[in-house]
Amino acid sequence: MYRLFFNLFFQRMDPEKAHELAFGWIRRAARIPFLRTLLASVLAPRRPELLTTAFGRLMPGPFGLAAGFDKNAAAVDGLAVLGFDHVEIGTVTGEPQPGNPRRRLFRLVPDRALVNRMGFNNDGSAAVAARLAERSAARGNARGPVAVGVNIGKTKTVPEAEAIADYVLSTERLAAHADYLVVNVSSPNTPGLRDLQATELLRPLLTAVREAADRTVTVRRVPLLVKIAPDLADEDVDAVADLAVELGLDGIIATNTTIARDGLGLRTRRDVVGAAGSGGLSGAPLKARSLQVLRRLYARVGDRVTLVGVGGVETADDVWERILAGATLVQGYSAFVYEGPFWCRRIHQGLARRLADSPYATLAEAVGAGHTERPGTTGGPGTTEAAEDDTAAETAEAAAKPEDDTTAATGGSDRTPGGSQ
Ligand SMILES: Cc1cc2nc3c(=O)[nH]c(=O)nc-3n(C[C@H](O)[C@H](O)[C@H](O)COP(=O)(O)O)c2cc1C
């Protein structure tokens, strides 16, 4: 039913206008107690077998909304009603900024993909912190079941030499409200941002943000993550993995959008892709590379760093595949646009089936189970047996395959014809 609605209605609208319209509905639905309860019971029934602990926080499940949908933390409760187990807000920058000129969001419908060059349009860290504080006060300071991650980035007008101070400012304002904090150095739409992924720049940045979080929040240790791009060379992925272990980082989110257009097997007409212009591509065509980066990271860090898998996740099979590849949490964004409000419900149903059909008693047991090699034996810090990284990644990929094939053969896809249920 949603697909029909999408085809008839949303697809004819400018994508950003459609986003704003849907966003308004989601935000308002959560404000009406009766509607909120009704929707949550239909869209987000609890499944105890999916309960997930990550970053010291119990969540209803492993599946969350990736950063960028709710940049200003304006609809967290509505998104929880739709069934997301965690919501990552942001990217929030030190100062408010309008982002790039419109049009800046495009659909590649035949590929179930999006291209965006939003440019971190957001209200700034002071306003978002105030909004989160207000939400917290309204709940009597009780943390709801759904975890809130806070993703921070650099203000566009801040020179690169002052980037650390800008991230520190956001950290000081937002860390207290974050179940986990993400340093985003991987969005393609802020000039120079992705250069911060180089370890010589990333080390001082992450160290400063860690110190700022510890200085600001003394009652608990706020988990700190970094979000990386799928366009990093394999050796740079390894370098970030090693740095994460070295700094005692809590997590890595893999991946952000890609600047690539070639080699993704795009089905959308070249002129349509060309007309969308520059920006980050997300959705189904990103699936293979994001999964590859995740596998590589897990082979390197094992369970020393918690991994969050994102990029091209559409179905419960995709979520399961990321978990076997080493992700404790999995996120999605683009497929939400194409799948609609029953998306989380379908993911949860399918995932519960995958788990029941598997040899694992819990999702936690399944994390990384697609790897045959003992993780952390591929030359990362603290390892004893150095192996060829590529070989290890390929072995892990091959090892995960029979599992995927089995689930595909026995369970099929969790997609319902027509897209709703
Ligand atoms: C319109 C749009 C805006 C986004 N904005 C952000 C952002 O502000 N910060 C960020 O870290 N990622 C952002 N992302 C990237 C997503 O969080 C995610 O990493 C990426 O889209 C891959 O997941 P997907 O294929 O499920 O969409 C954005 C993605 C889209 C489509």
Image (cartoon, rainbow, N blue to C red):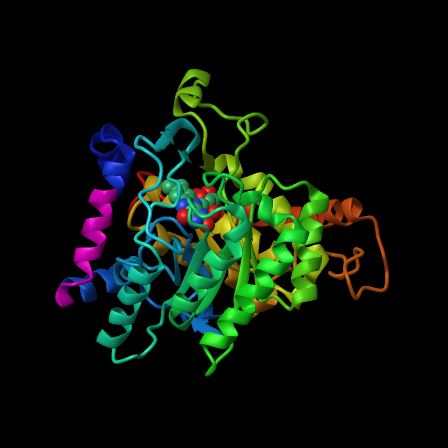
Q: Main secondary structure of the magenta part?
A: helix
- Percent of width and height locating residue 276: 39, 25
Give the x, y percent position of residue 252.
Answer: 57, 58
Task: Please state which of residues 359 and 48 is positioned toward the viewer in this rendering.
Answer: 48
Q: Is residue 28 magenta?
A: yes
**Stretch of the chain drawn in magenta:** 20-34
Q: Residue at 73% of width from left, 45% of height from top?
A: 235
Is residue 334 shown to the viewer in this render? no
Q: Is residue 281 left or right of residue 37?
A: right
Residue 26 left/right relative to 378? left
Q: Is residue 397 visible?
A: yes
Q: Quadrant of residue 231?
A: top right
Above or below: residue 156 compared with residue 168: above
Say whether residue 368 is left or right of residue 54. right
Q: Position of residue 121 (x, y in %)?
A: 34, 45
Ligand 1: give its quadrant.
top left
Where residue 127 sits in the image (x, y, percent)? 29, 60
Would residue 316 appear left or right of 409 to someone viewing this image?
A: left
Residue 95 magenta-highlighted: no
**Relative depth, front residue between 416 and 118:** 118
The residue lying furthest to the bottom in this view is: 219
Residue 83's quadrant in the figure? bottom left
